[in-house]
Image (spheres, rainbow, N blue to C red):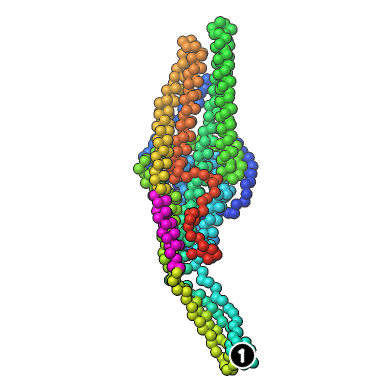
Amino acid sequence: MRTRVFVLLALAPLGGCRNVPHTATCHSHAAASIRQPIPAAPAPAVAQTAAPRAQVVPASHAQPDLTEPATGPLVERLPAPAGAPAESAASGATCAGMTLASIEDMATTYNPTLTQARTQVDGTLGKALQAGLWPNPVLGYQAEKIGSQGTAGEFQGGFIRQEIITAQKRRVSREKYLARAKAAEFGALAQQYRVVNDIRRQYWRAAGATRLVTIHEQMVKNAEDRLVTVEEMFNVGQSNTVQVRQARVTLQRTKLDLLAKINDRDQARRELSALVGVELPEELYGDELDESVPPLTWDASLAYTLGESPEVREATAKLESDRITVERELRQPIPNVFVQAGPGYDFTDNRTVVNAQVTVQPPIWDRNQGTIQQAHADLSRQRAELCRIELRLKRDLSMHFKQYLTAQQHVESYRGEVLPEAEQAYKARLKSYKQQRETWPMVLDAQSELYQRQAEYVHNLVTWRDSQTLIEGFLLTGGLDAPQNPTPPGHIDATPQPR
């Protein structure tokens, strides 16, 4: 499902972290009666489809105008998170327009790592521009044998000297840095996935933590009712002091669990605000956790990850850059030609003359042997790096797919069997109590069991969404980590004239 467009290279300059006013509150959870548990979610209809695809449009397929910064769109579309609301009036109604989509859009403007990634692309294009420029000519004035025969000299005149680059060295150098710029673009795309993945994962956690707070509030009411019941039973001799103290301990532990869930919710919201780069309203989380989404399959996910991963494509672009580097260094020993010429006047013979000179530096001792060896080593290292990245992605995908599959199985089982059965058990005991066939503590036990199963269901939902986000986002995380330099360590990067 694709519903949003992310443009990375056309980002506005980072304006710093700003506060967004709390315009509205999404909704407040009304305190339900202790005898009215949270209803179970209906089981969705699930279709079998492959994972979504990200459409990547590298800017360096054709030679760009290197005199201008890169401003074209790098990414056509990133896949929308499974279950996320569509861009419509209905979805925009969530918390005064604060949807997951709008949060991601804000991050493209305010997250500083995306600005860093963009500047790395511009910087590499600047290197490509510089590497392809010819050296400037040299202008000068020359005087020889001043005072010879009482004259101003044998030669007085100006000259111009130019270095002629042979073997198209500067063109190959520019191609090398254009390949690195392409790698930088894929690195920027990977950084955008890191930001979006972290935002989606944190959003699911915040939404799950908000729902868990509501469930634990019901658990506290259940524990309070249990304590009142045990104390009343103690007054009539149907329970003892130990049972009263145990009920008090249970109530206190339940309250502490509630406080822990509130802390988890607040932490998730703060981390989400940090990822976006602005302060977000406290109540902005919809209830998309339960929405049905197409399941993922191992074969489709593996092919998608290895075929479309920005990390793999960045490593492939770096491999091409290293191949061009070898070609460039093999051309380096071919000597350039220095030509010099200029008109002048010979005062000894009183005539106009012309001075001309051509020089070359033959590669007798220095034939660039060491740098060529280094370039071949870099090429071999990058081949191994590409293989390493693919194997690491396969290993990490295996782990996350296992977590996804396990959580999905739990979610479907809880939706279809566990929660409905637990709810029916509670209702049956409540009905029996009204008919004076069950005691109230047994009703409270069934209600507590239902709340516990609901909490487990939310935990599985969050794990399911989290794993799905990682799989669909190429396993990329680290939305606030600085983007990596497009030039790997150990590579040739001479200055001031790169080659």
For residue 17, say whether it is visible. yes
Q: Is residue 48 left or right of residue 279?
A: left
Indicate whether 95 appears above or below 246.
below
Q: Nearer the viewer, residue 105 or 68?
A: 68
Residue ID at (56%, 15%): 247
Residue ID at (48%, 18%): 446
Give the magenta range. 366-387
Q: Is residue 173 highlighted in magenta?
A: no
Give the x, y percent position of residue 123. 54, 59
Q: Which of 189 and 367 is in front in this view?
A: 367
Q: Is residue 144 left or right of residue 461?
A: right
Query: What secondary structure is the stretch in magenta mostly built from?
Result: helix
Q: Which residue lies furthest to the top in this view?
A: 237
Give the x, y percent position of residue 49. 37, 42
Give the image quarter of residue 343. Answer: bottom right
Indicate whether 489 appears above or below 48.
below
Residue ID at (40%, 29%): 413
Indicate whether 322 appears above or below 191.
below
* Three-letter code for the amino acid on which mark 1 is drawn: Ser
Residue at mark 1: 148
